[in-house]
Amino acid sequence: SAFFLPSSSGHKMLCFTSSERVKTGRTAAVSLFLAAAAAWTTCMHAARSQLSVKSLASTTAPLPPLRFPTVCSRASQSPQTGGGGLHYKRGLAGRRLRSCNSWHSNAAAVGNEGSDLLQKDYDLIIIGGGPTGCAAAEKAAYAGHSAMVIDDPGTGKKVQLGGPTGLFSKALRDTASRIDVKLLKAMGLSDKSIWSQVQEMCKEIQLVETQNTVRRLRSIAVPRIQGKASFTPKGMVKLEFRNGKSVEVHGNRYLLATGSSAFQARGIPFDSRRVFDSDSVKDLSYLPNDVAITGAGIIAIEYAKIFAKFGAHVTLIIRDSSFPAAMERVGVDRDIAEALRKDLLASGVEILYNRVVGDFSVPPSITTPMAIQLLDRTTNKPTGEQLRVDTYLFAAGRLPNTNGLGLEEAGVQLDDKGRVLVDGNLETSKKGVYAAGDILGPPGLASTGIEQGAAAVTHMFSTPKEGEAGGGWGRR
């Protein structure tokens, strides 16, 4: 059967062939109707993104997902050259994937298929490929709007698309619930072997999350572009690739969803080996027996519970004089805070109040504990206490990823901490530019960012009635 699809570039044909003999009777008619409906749905997705679909072969398995190109900075070489443009890997289910790096699929060279995507005018361009950005893209696509996601791969260490910055902690938490470290040690397994298993399980969980996000975006024909985006003084968005090339992309509306990065306090010798922040902790390469954590927010509590589950002795260092007072600053009810405190103590976590860290003595060998001096928070003088731990984690604050985006030059207002200011509809001071997620500041939760992203898309594509007030997300 052949289905013709009208589009702006003329009629496109989708050929639907059968590898089996067509059965006669009512069953064959029903099967052909369902196959035609599935093919037509796929065509509609293709038309929305102006992609040409050549053919699909029907089998007893479901139709394959719609493939679309993803542009990246290293996709300038032919896959036949083997020079780093397109790399092939097998996913967890044995499916062959194209990747521009370890978490990337379906790359296309700039100037070929990719150029059509970049020259197109989109209803919405989303800067940021975390949970906020991807959820907003899905919301827009399901509402019938064309959307594109620009995701900055950064240094190349990113391991997931569509997952929150804290996806590693979620993977680690899930792994901790599956592995009984005490039992494995009793069986004679070394710490190195146990942690190697933990790392592999975390990587698998993160990879599955990435693949699921890729499939969802692919199924709704939302292209994702790898590159660094920034606003020009004229309000356009310039997209820079790793190979130094750049191009302007055009959208009727923009959503900023670049997330946040870990705050690093002065005087702490961060080395991503024994002294970590809430981002670099994913590089932990050994199973610690003693851990010290500074912070009283969600991230600090989460890691305290995780390391305690792995059998480590955990010391939680808090600046405030009480746990409820510390949690109240991040918006947690005092009764809930008290329940959290009791749960931490029941997990074996030791809590020190009114303390900050002072001098560090970090031996070169990870098998030798490091010494951390404790100071009184009010006087900033040594308390005489010293912690001897394998690992230290500073998890007290995060900073919005707004540097290098050209926001102020484009007319987007920021506060004194670099956070984007928005109104009740999540629109910035620049008309047509919206923001959601960690880039706005606390609470810095993926669930909140997803809700904000969906709300922003709803508001930007709706016409408010006369006298109707905006939403409740604003902070100007």
Image (tube, grey):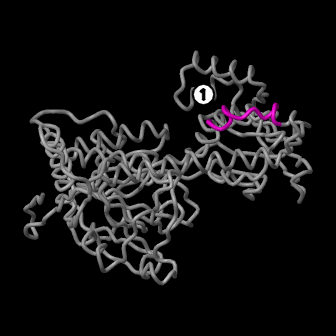
Residue on which disc 1 sits: 327
What kind of element bears circle 1? helix
Where is 125 relative to 232, above or below? Answer: above
Q: Quadrant of the C terminus?
A: top left
**Front-lying residue, 112 or 243:** 112
Residue 177 is inside the magenta segment: yes
| Above or below for 418 versus 29 | below
What range of the chain is rendered magenta? 174-184
Q: Position of residue 383 (x, y in %)?
A: 88, 36
- Main SS type for the magenta part? helix
Q: Is residue 377 left or right of residue 202?
A: right
Question: Could you say where residue 58 lies in the image, as x and y percent from the top left?
Answer: 26, 54
In the image, residue 434 lies at what x, y percent? 30, 50
Kind of residue sitting beneath label 1: Met
On the image, the x and y values in percent for residue 122 come to: 22, 61
Residue 140 showing in the rendered view: yes
